[in-house]
Image: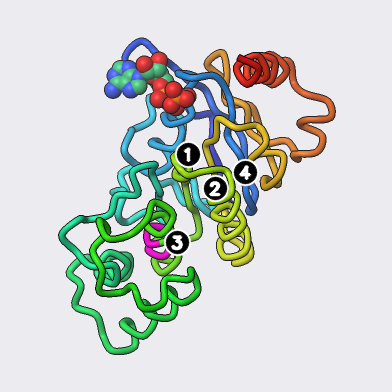
Amino acid sequence: MLKLDALGLRQGDFSLTVDFECPAGLTAIIGPSGGGKSTLLAAIAGFLNPAYGSVLWNGKDLAGVAPGARPVSMLFQDNNLFPHLSVWQNVGLGLDPSLRLSPAQKDAVMQILRDVDLDGMDQRKPAALSGGQQSRVALARVLIADRPVVLLDEPFAALGPALKSGMLSLVRDMLVGAGKTVLMVTHDPDDARRFADQVIVIAGGVAHAPVPTESAFADPHPALRTYLGAADADHSK
Ligand SMILES: Nc1ncnc2c1ncn2[C@@H]1O[C@H](COP(=O)(O)OP(=O)(O)OP(=O)(O)O)[C@@H](O)[C@H]1O
């Protein structure tokens, strides 16, 4: 279980406090811009050292553990694909950064590419793929890395609504279905309503403990009520 134990995070003048456990399943992180959503992911991934408190995985304090050695994979909006590498190489990096893959590992890459519907595209470079296909390459790399915690920082925001829903369904089927702890930043409350098991609201310098999605929206915390009001006003512009 991922535990954020009396955690304090600082970025310049900004500070955020976090104190809860995050269960497995898909947890949406929502809240106003500049509220600290990416800051929280950076601390879990190991890119930002806590000012105080700890990030723990299954009871082990991750302080001092480098990002690459954490039980964590991260997917950003720009997908982090290497333009000079082929699709299979971009995915293979999730298994071995030196890309010296055994035949069994190569087979595993091909299988994952079939799973995300990229059969036959293994030799292409990212530039020769659509936006949705690029997202699936990035997801395939996360899948093959097989880490127990997956952080999604709005990776599908640039896709159209149908493609985005398709990607979120894949995330549910393949990551949540495998029992992983998936934290997903989103600016769209509907993504949270439709796909998340729990919701974390980050506002006013506090990351609030996860609440089951249904009750989070049926009886919103004041911070969520304020945010939803602002999001609705934004939509009706
Ligand atoms: N390197 C930095 N130095 C100083 N302040 C920073 C730094 N990075 C982020 N901040 C500040 O930390 C605060 C939280 O930023 P963060 O990116 O976590 O918010 P967010 O909720 O992810 O926002 P958005 O929804 O706009 O992406 C902001 O006020 C931001 O200006």
Is 9 displayed left or right of 204 in the figure? left
Q: Earlier in the sequence, mark 2 or mark 4?
A: 4
SS assignment at label 3: loop
Q: Which mark is residue 157?
A: 1
Q: Which residue position is annotated with label 4?
A: 27
- At label 1, counting other C-alpha atoms closer than 10 Å, the crowd grade (few under 14, some 14-19, many 20 or more) is some
* Tag 2–tag 1 contact (CB < 8 Å): yes
What's the residue type where badge 3 is placed? Arg
Splitting the image into 4 quarters, where does residue 198 fall?
top right
Q: Is residue 139 magenta?
A: yes
CA gap, disc 1 to disc 4?
17 Å
- At label 3, counting other C-alpha atoms closer than 10 Å, the crowd grade (few under 14, some 14-19, many 20 or more) is some
Q: Which residues are magenta?
A: 137-141
161 and 11: which is toward the camera: 161
99 and 13: which is toward the camera: 99
Q: Which mark is residue 147?
A: 3
Splitting the image into 4 quarters, where does residue 30 fall?
top right
* Residue 8 at least partly seen: no
- Residue 98 vertical placement versus 56 (above, below): below
Q: Which residue position is annotated with label 2?
A: 164
Q: Earlier in the sequence, mark 2 or mark 3?
A: 3
Looking at the image, which residue is at 43% across and 80% down?
Answer: 111
Looking at the image, which residue is at 53% across and 29% down?
Answer: 6
